């Protein structure tokens, strides 16, 4: 039942975002101990404060997948990729494509718990006058049956 899988995913894969200090101009991610950007010279912290000028939150795909694989029920649901039967001449999923088949023939995806992902990236400017580009990265775990993805 798809609804119960969604509930299970939400409860069992609650991965927290990691927060990092970045340059106010988005030049770089600051390393421990750095107080100014080595590219543009902007300060890391607000004047008279220990608060960073700009931060970035990131969620780790690896952390998320590790949590999923740590749950027996979800790990079994992710075995769709390794257990599905391909029908000759029929393209119904990513795994029917020539690139996947060629990749697999090179001894990849030998373990039933290997995870296939699709990565979609789209960049845009938030407002007409904004100087900051934003990028959305969307990751889809392909190991699930398409009805659950």
Image (cartoon, rainbow, N blue to C red):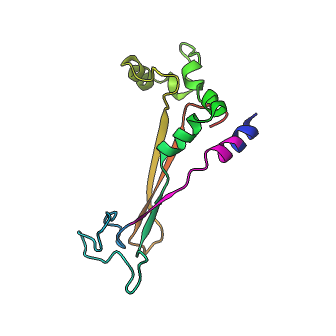
Residue 16 on the magenta segment: yes
The residue under the point 55% across, 25% down is 81
In the depicted structure, whether residue 110 falls above or below residue 45? above
Q: Residue 7 falls in which quadrant of the image?
A: top right
The residue closer to the viewer here, 79 or 95, is 79
Span colored in magenta: 8-21
The residue under the point 44% across, 61% down is 124
Task: Find residue 147 and report its horizontal and vertical position in percent.
Answer: 67, 33
Quadrant in which the C terminus is drawn: top right
Q: Residue furthest front?
A: 33
In the depicted structure, whether residue 67 falls above or below residue 81? below
The residue closer to the viewer here, 122 or 3, is 3
Task: Find residue 125 and report its horizontal and vertical position in percent.
Answer: 44, 65
Quadrant in which the N terminus is drawn: top right
Q: Residue 4 falls in which quadrant of the image?
A: top right
Task: Find residue 36 and report its horizontal and vertical position in percent.
Answer: 28, 74
Residue 65 on the magenta segment: no
In the depicted structure, whether residue 75 falls above or below residue 107? below
Does residue 53 appear left or right of residue 64 in this picture?
Answer: left
The residue under the point 58% across, 25% down is 79
- How many labels, in total? 0
Task: Find residue 16 and report its horizontal and vertical position in percent.
Answer: 55, 55
In the depicted structure, whether residue 50 falls above or below residue 118? below
The residue under the point 30% across, 68% down is 33
The residue closer to the viewer here, 29 or 136, is 29
Q: Residue furthest bottom?
A: 48
């Amino acid at each position: 039942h798809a609804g119960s899988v969604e509930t299970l995913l939400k409860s069992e894969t609650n991965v927290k975002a990691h927060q990092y200090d970045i340059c106010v101009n988005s030049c770089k991610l600051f390393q421990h101990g750095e107080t100014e950007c080595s590219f543009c010279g902007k300060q890391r912290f607000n004047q008279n404060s220990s608060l960073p000028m700009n931060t970035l939150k990131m969620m780790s795909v690896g952390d998320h997948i590790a949590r999923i694989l740590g749950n027996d029920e979800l790990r079994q649901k992710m075995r769709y990729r390794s257990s599905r039967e391909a029908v000759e001449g029929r393209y119904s999923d990513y795994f029917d494509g020539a690139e996947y088949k060629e990749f697999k023939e090179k001894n990849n995806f030998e373990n039933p718990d290997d995870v296939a992902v699709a990565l979609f990236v789209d960049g845009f400017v938030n407002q007409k006058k904004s100087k900051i580009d934003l990028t959305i990265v969307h990751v889809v775990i392909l190991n699930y049956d398409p009805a659950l993805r």
